[in-house]
Image (cartoon, rainbow, N blue to C red):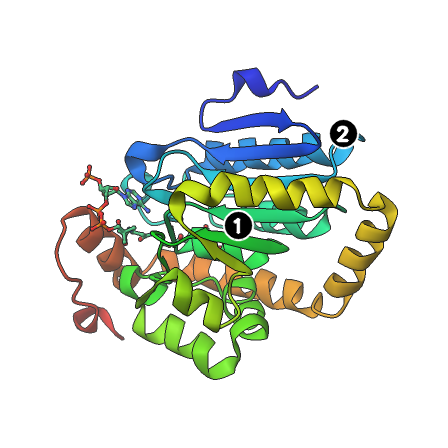
């Protein structure tokens, strides 16, 4: 039996027919550790099993960040939990896709690294005009090859996805909207109203029709699950290299990384 009141890193709340799953580590810009991922998985299971819930809202606490990916301060090579890289990140990514209910990313601030991948995986995204989206993988010695790359290209096109991964720039709400990465951009103080408007509409739709629609969209891109598994096993080996560790150390020491001295 999952008891969300015991969670430390995640807030789980049912508001009307919408389950709100809130990453609650605002001091670390909602970066995740292994425990965060476990609590997110548990939250999605609760939402999946609750017949009264017709949609899920994924967001971050505070106004600075949606989620900035893996907690770099808790990382020394691999992360500290279970799973291929010490985070059951593939389980969480799968449940976001497999839960037969629309998942809305409420992008309230930075969606960076693994947080950017979450936003990519959600069915719909509503973004505050003050928020920023971007990838940092090659800047910090990491890469989400699969959902983060190939699935992103489905949304924004192959060239734009490569730009996002190779240059690691940050994009505004307007830019994200133009490239097809989000559905809607609203002033920050209208974000909750916009999210509630859409969860209220979804609450009036047939749950079975929505589930079938979601499964049909997923079936067309499910080959990427295999690429992701492959990518995760490769990145596990990469995390043990000095080149990858240099990215993490540079972030912790607030300096630019020097990867080239470690290239073999
Ligand atoms: C988000 C920033 C761009 C914000 O920049 P700025 O406004 O200048 O603020 P900062 O001073 O940098 O940050 C404020 C404060 O927050 C702390 N912080 C921010 N992000 C993190 C983080 N990820 N981990 C730990 N701490 C963080 C920061 O240190 C500051 O704290 P102070 O105490 O005030 O100093 C910028 O912060 C930024 O770029 N952040 C880093 C983002 C990052 O590197 N993320 C990790 C990317 S790698 C990843 O997510 C992989 C994880 C993973 O699960 C995975 C593994 C393998 C395969 C696939 C995946 C997958 O994700 O799918």
Q: Relative to 140, is 99 on the left or the right?
A: right
Q: Is residue 66 visible?
A: no
- The reply to whether dot 1 and dot 2 touch (C-beta < 8 Å) is no
State the residue position of label 2.
50
Mark 2, ligand 1, within 8 Å: the answer is no
Depth check, mark 1 against mark 2: the one in front is 2
Where does the image place residue 152, in percent across and percent down from the top left?
Answer: 53, 68
Q: Relative to 248, is 209 on the left or the right?
A: right
Where does the image place residue 217, in percent across and percent down from the top left?
Answer: 74, 64
Where does the image place residue 177, in percent across and percent down from the top left?
Answer: 48, 66
Q: Estimate how packed mark 1 is, as few (under 14), some (14 to 19) or many (20 or more) residues with alpha carbons within 10 Å.
A: some
Where does the image place residue 70, in percent across and percent down from the top left?
Answer: 39, 46
State the residue position of label 1.
84
Q: Nearer the viewer, residue 162 or 89?
A: 162
Question: Earlier along the polypeptide chain: callout 1 or callout 2?
Answer: 2
Q: CA distance from mark 1 to mark 2?
A: 29 Å
Q: Relative to 13, is 256 on the left or the right?
A: left
| Helix, strand or loop at mark 2 | loop
Find residue 213 and name its label: none
Mark 1, ligand 1, within 8 Å: the answer is yes
Residue under the image location 14 percent in, 61 percent down: 256
Q: Is residue 100 visible?
A: yes
Q: Estimate how packed mark 2 is, as few (under 14), some (14 to 19) or many (20 or more) residues with alpha carbons within 10 Å.
A: few
| Helix, strand or loop at mark 1 | loop
Extreme bottom residue here?
159
Q: Nearer the viewer, residue 227 or 66?
A: 66
The mark total stands at 2
Q: Quadrant of the N terminus?
A: top right
Residue 235 in the image: above or below residue 252: below
């Amino acid at each position: 039996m999952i008891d969300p009141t015991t969670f430390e890193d995640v807030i789980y709340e049912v508001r009307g027919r919408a389950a709100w799953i809130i990453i609650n580590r605002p001091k670390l810009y909602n970066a995740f550790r292994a425990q965060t991922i476990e609590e997110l998985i548990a939250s999605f299971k609760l939402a999946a099993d609750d017949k009264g819930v017709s949609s899920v809202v994924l967001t971050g606490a505070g106004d600075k960040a949606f989620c900035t990916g893996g907690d770099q301060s808790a990382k020394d090579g691999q992360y500290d939990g279970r799973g291929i890289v010490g985070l059951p990140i593939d389980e969480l990514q799968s449940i976001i896709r497999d839960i037969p209910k629309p998942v809305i990313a409420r992008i309230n601030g930075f969606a960076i690294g693994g947080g950017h991948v979450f936003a990519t995986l959600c069915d719909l995204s509503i973004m505050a005009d003050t928020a920023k989206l971007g990838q940092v993988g090659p800047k910090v010695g990491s890469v989400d090859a699969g959902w983060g790359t190939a699935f992103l290209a489905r949304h924004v096109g192959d060239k734009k996805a490569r730009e996002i991964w190779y240059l690691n720039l940050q994009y505004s709400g307007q830019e994200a909207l133009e490239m097809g990465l989000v559905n809607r951009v609203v002033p920050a103080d209208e974000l909750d109203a916009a999210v509630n408007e859409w969860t209220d509409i979804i609450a009036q739709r047939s749950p079975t029709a929505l589930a079938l629609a979601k499964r049909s969209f997923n079936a067309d891109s499910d080959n990427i699950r295999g690429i992701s598994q492959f990518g995760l096993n490769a990145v596990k080996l990469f995390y043990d290299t000095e080149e990858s560790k240099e990215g993490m150390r540079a972030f912790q020491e607030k300096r630019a990384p020097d990867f080239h001295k470690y290239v073999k």
